[in-house]
Image: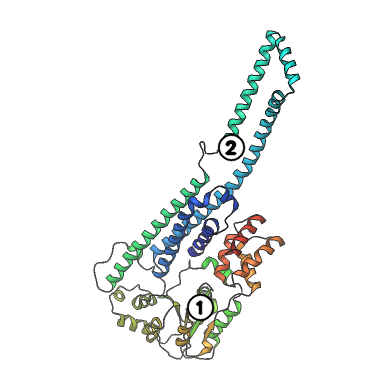
Amino acid sequence: MACVVVLSLMRTLELEFLQPLPRPILQQNQLIPCNKDLAQSLLNKLGSLMELFDENRMDGLEAIKDLETKLRDVASRIEDEIELQVVHLYEDEIQLEEEEHRIFEGIFDIFDGIVDKTFQPPGEEEEEEEEEEEVPQGEKSTHHCQSLNLHQRTTHHCQRLHQILHPLGGKSHPCLKFGRTLHRAVQDIDAVTQELAKAKEEYQLFKHHLQGGTKQPASLHVLPIPTHQGITIPDSSHTASHTKEIMVGKQDEFKIIKEKLIQHPSKQLEIVSIKGMGGIGKTTLAKKIYEDPSITSYFDKRAWIVASQHHNKRQMLLDLLGSKDNNANSSSNEDLALQLYQSLKRLRYLIVMDDVWSVEAWDALKTCFPDDGYGSRVLLTTRIGEVANHICTQNEFSHQMQLLEQSESWKLFNEKACKSRGAEFETIGRPVVEKCKGLPLTIIVVAGLFSKLNTLDEWKNTANAQHSR
């Protein structure tokens, strides 16, 4: 899921570059002042890009699916590069300390010899001078070579010490390395943003063509993905890899919704709503129910559409019809609504309307759903309680999703972190999970961050950074 990876990268940028108390190793290497603006720029661009994907949702389009995959890969690569460079800082620091220790030992040995020669009592110095006058010529040459050798060794070690204290010679400063990484990241995100704008433009041209406007655009890769048997299948990449984790603690709610759909005695068309805040797992729960074998065998026909914040009646109609018929593309909205009504007539059907933001989105389609007394259902998800209350005529068909209990939150965190840790790690991790307030998506993002940390100190530093926010 692209948004989880992007949120993890955004969190990493905040923790490493933008928090009041960054890691000491970053402060020691002066990485924050020279890269803070670049990190903030990247963070802003990532946030804007996520908003663009959300505002211009064109689910089922190959171009958008490709861009989401590209964004996920780019964000994952950037985060890996940042974390790898942080690891290198620690490795360089250890290597530098060992090298300094070795060099200083050599220099101190030499200085000890120099001190013994330089700071001798006056009497001894005069005696040595007198003795030196009596030294034969050959022995004087040997003594001179030893002094020269001592001087050369001293010069060598001093030069090496200078290299240690001034390590820029022939080697890039970590500040420059981080800067290059962030600069490349900004360029990559800008490229994805431009491709998204282009795909949106081509998609708008295609929709205009459907409405009898200009010629069809040549970029066919933005056309809706064909579906089977006239059923619009939800995007399998949307939270698919995280279904198991988010379903932690949701089994009771899964049974409640399923009972309303297939076990309730009402044979009328009933509207069942799942409401709750963003990130609580509404879509994942609906998808799990939609694909459950007891649901697929009970209903004669199923269809799934995404309404989104800016719903489009025609697009929703085309999605429900499967949009495979060329005649449907040239039909009016009234004709499409009639086709949909007739395709559902005398069938027991399930329609899922995901991410409904307004009553108007429901009003645009409600007359297309026949009520033949076969026990058909419309399942909608929304984050707005007033929308669910208005659409559902009976309170018993409206379900408010609950946040996870603390034990469920910790279980989800452990499943996502995918690593067995000792009691010391649990002592650090539990307060962090408590701050997530039982919101599944937040827990998954935080767990993804901690899953990449291996040592107890790294867990402590990251946890302290979380608590300081």
Which residue is the extreme one toward the left? 214
Residue 185 in view here: yes
Q: Is residue 264 above or below residue 212?
A: below
Query: In the rendered structure, which amino acid carries the disc numbered 1?
Result: Thr
**Residue receiving disc 2:** 164
Q: Residue at x 59, y 63 (%)?
A: 466
Nearer to us: label 1 or label 2: 2
Give x and y (percent) for residue 77: 50, 54
Q: Is residue 226 above or below residue 94?
A: below
Q: Residue at x 42, y 57 (%)?
A: 189
Q: Give neighbour class at mark 2: few <14, some 14-19, many 20+ (Cα, 10 Å).
A: some
Q: Residue at x 48, y 64 (%)?
A: 3
> Does residue 248 appear left or right of residue 49 in this picture?
right
Give x and y (percent) for residue 304: 44, 76
Of labels 1 and 2, earlier in sequence is: 2
Instruction: Tell me the element at label 1.
Output: helix
Query: In the rendered structure, which amino acid carries the disc numbered 2?
Result: Ile
Front position in the image: 356 or 430: 430
Residue 57 in view here: no
Front position in the image: 118 or 455: 118
Which residue is the extreme one toward the front? 122
Instruction: Tell me the element at label 2.
Output: helix
Q: Is residue 127 above or below residue 21?
A: above
Q: Is residue 107 above or below residue 244?
A: above
Q: Give neighbour class at mark 1: few <14, some 14-19, many 20+ (Cα, 10 Å).
A: some
Front position in the image: 265 or 440: 440
Q: Residue at x 55, y 47 (%)?
A: 29
> Does residue 298 appear left or right of residue 134 in this picture?
left
Give x and y (percent) for residue 450: 60, 60
Query: CB under 8 Å between callouts 1 and 2?
Result: no
- Number of marks in picture: 2
**Residue receiving disc 1:** 296
